[in-house]
């Protein structure tokens, strides 16, 4: 198994677990603040932030400024969410105030991002993975690191937050170990 095949398999696993983690949530649970903490983000924000991040990294950064699924689909307008930001560095109060009012449409956006990533990774030009890319605010790194660190590792971190949020909401874990 190559490194790219490993990342591809892990992103597929991550996507399935994120989907499972929100499959049974009510709209109220999507937006509940875990533990009522003024510093915690709700599940809707966590998934929106991660999907937007993957969309930006895989399309805009790794595919050399290819328009994101977010931009191509007019998702900001459709969902009434910020057109450019993806939540990185957003103040907690702003993140907590964010609402996804059309969860069905948002899930379609997320699925389009997962499909776009999978399609690109199905037949990548692996020679491009050593190319340096700029990932703000992290700095310059090899493209493969952007994929592994900012998509895969970052995504699993948000998955853990999603599972903790479920626990704090009194829900059973969605991910079996």
Image: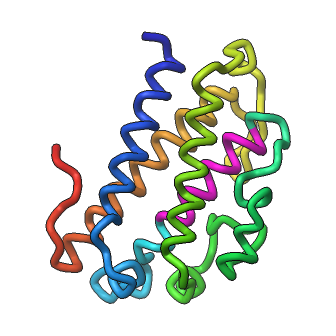
Q: Nearer the viewer, residue 139 or 23?
A: 23
Q: Residue at x 61, y 32 (%)?
A: 119
Quarter-of-image position of residue 52: bottom right
- Magenta stretch contains residue 48: yes
Quarter-of-image position of residue 72: bottom right
Main SS class of the magenta portion in the image:
helix
Q: Residue furthest right?
A: 65
Quarter of the image with the N terminus is top left
Q: Residue at x 82, y 49 (%)?
A: 67
Q: Position of residue 109 (x, y in %)?
A: 59, 60
Q: Position of residue 9 (x, y in %)?
A: 42, 28
Give the magenta part as a residue range. 47-61
Quarter-of-image position of residue 122: top right
Q: Position of residue 10 (x, y in %)?
A: 41, 33
Is residue 34 left or right of 171 when viewed as pictured?
right
Q: Residue at x 71, y 60 (%)?
A: 70
Above-or-below relation of 136 to 98: above
Q: Nearer the viewer, residue 136 or 83?
A: 83
Q: Residue at x 25, y 70 (%)?
A: 166
Above-or-below relation of 59 to 97: above
**Tag count:** 0
Quarter of the image with the C terminus is top left
- Magenta stretch contains residue 44: no
Q: How is the image coloured?
A: rainbow
């Amino acid at each position: 198994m190559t490194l790219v095949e490993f990342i591809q398999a892990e992103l597929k696993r991550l996507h399935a677990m994120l989907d499972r983690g929100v499959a049974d949530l009510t709209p109220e649970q999507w937006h509940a603040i875990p533990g009522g903490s003024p510093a915690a983000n709700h599940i809707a924000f966590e998934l929106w932030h991660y999907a937007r991040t993957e969309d930006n990294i895989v399309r805009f950064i790794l595919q050399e400024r290819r328009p994101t699924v977010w931009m191509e689909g007019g998702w900001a307008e459709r969902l009434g969410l910020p057109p450019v930001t993806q939540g990185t560095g957003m103040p907690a109060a702003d993140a907590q105030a964010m609402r996804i009012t059309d969860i069905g449409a948002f899930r379609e956006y997320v699925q389009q991002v997962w499909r776009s990533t999978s399609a690109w990774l199905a037949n990548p030009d692996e020679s491009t993975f050593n190319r340096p890319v700029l990932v703000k605010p992290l700095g310059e790194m090899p493209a493969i690191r952007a994929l592994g660190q900012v998509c895969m590792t970052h995504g699993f971190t948000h998955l853990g937050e999603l599972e903790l949020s479920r626990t704090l909401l009194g829900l059973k874990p969605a991910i079996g170990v």
